[in-house]
Amino acid sequence: MRYRHVIWDWNGTLLDDAWLCVEILNGLLRAHELPVISVEAYRALFSFPVVGFYERMGFNFKNVSFDEISVRYISEYNRRRYECRLQPHTRESLDRIRAAGIEQSVLSAYHEDTLREVVTHYGLTDYFSRLSGLDNIRADGKLDRGRAHLRALDLHEAAHTVLLIGDTAHDHEVAAALGADCLLLHHGHMHIDRLDGRGAPVAANLREAVDAALRAPAAVPRA
């Protein structure tokens, strides 16, 4: 078996929340008299760190601070967070990975305390050996948290046996920096055109992703 451990991203990967992110973003854009965007446009433009994405949306952080925008965004997201559903095949996919004897965890750019609350709400806590999120709401990225995540799992010297499954180019960047494999899904926050060609397999849904993970050849330690 190739993988000892699967690290899941949360937002967009296991939770179907891109539509809610666009609704909240559009509310902020309207409040600042900026053009709203469609879900398709969002998925074509979204990126980490989020501050750069907001600047491309037209926000002028000389007039309003990014921290203020972040607080307003997260407050509205948290108010509505349980309107979201899990992605199709989520429980089935987690069950299949667990049945294969592979440990699972979550690495997210979501605030860690809130991540724990939402994973509990959706009844998924027992699937994961560790939940790691950020200690702020700026969504700057999760590479440093990822390094700490692997150390806490005692996998920092066996990253070649880890698969990170996410829905953004940043997930691929994090996996590459950690020395882990990556599998990307295009049902979340980024369009398939932005995920193809990165050297990682791209799946349409969780069922396809797990099929690919379970049929991967045995791991070979990297020099």
Image: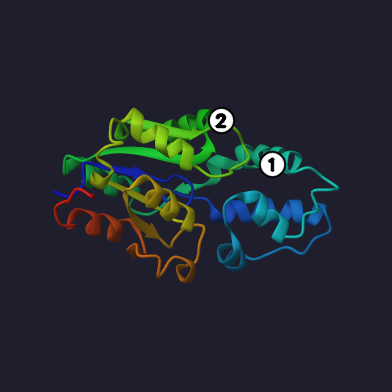
Labels 1 and 2: the sequence-earlier one: 1
Q: Residue 41 appears at what percent x and percent y? A: 61, 67
* Amino acid type, mark 1: Ser
Measured as percent of width and height from the top left, residue 67 is found at 72, 39
Near mark 2 (Cα within 10 A), the count class, few <14, some 14-19 or many ≥20, is few
Q: Is residue 138 above or below residue 217?
A: above
- Is residue 212 left or right of 135 when viewed as pictured? left
Q: How many marks?
A: 2
Return the x and y of residue 141 as percentages of the image width and height: 54, 45
Residue at the spot 30% in from the left edge and 35% down from the top edge: 127
| 187 in relation to 130, above or below | below
Q: Quadrant of residue 91?
A: top left
Q: What is the number of the mark on residue 40?
A: none
- Between circles 1 and 2, the one closer to the viewer is 2
Residue at (37, 45) in percent of width and height: 178
The disc placed on residue 70 is 1
Identify the residue at the far front of this view: 223
Q: Which mark is residue 135?
A: 2
> Mark 1 falls on what kind of element?
helix
Q: Name the residue type under label 2.
A: Asp
Comparing 76 with 71, the one in front is: 71
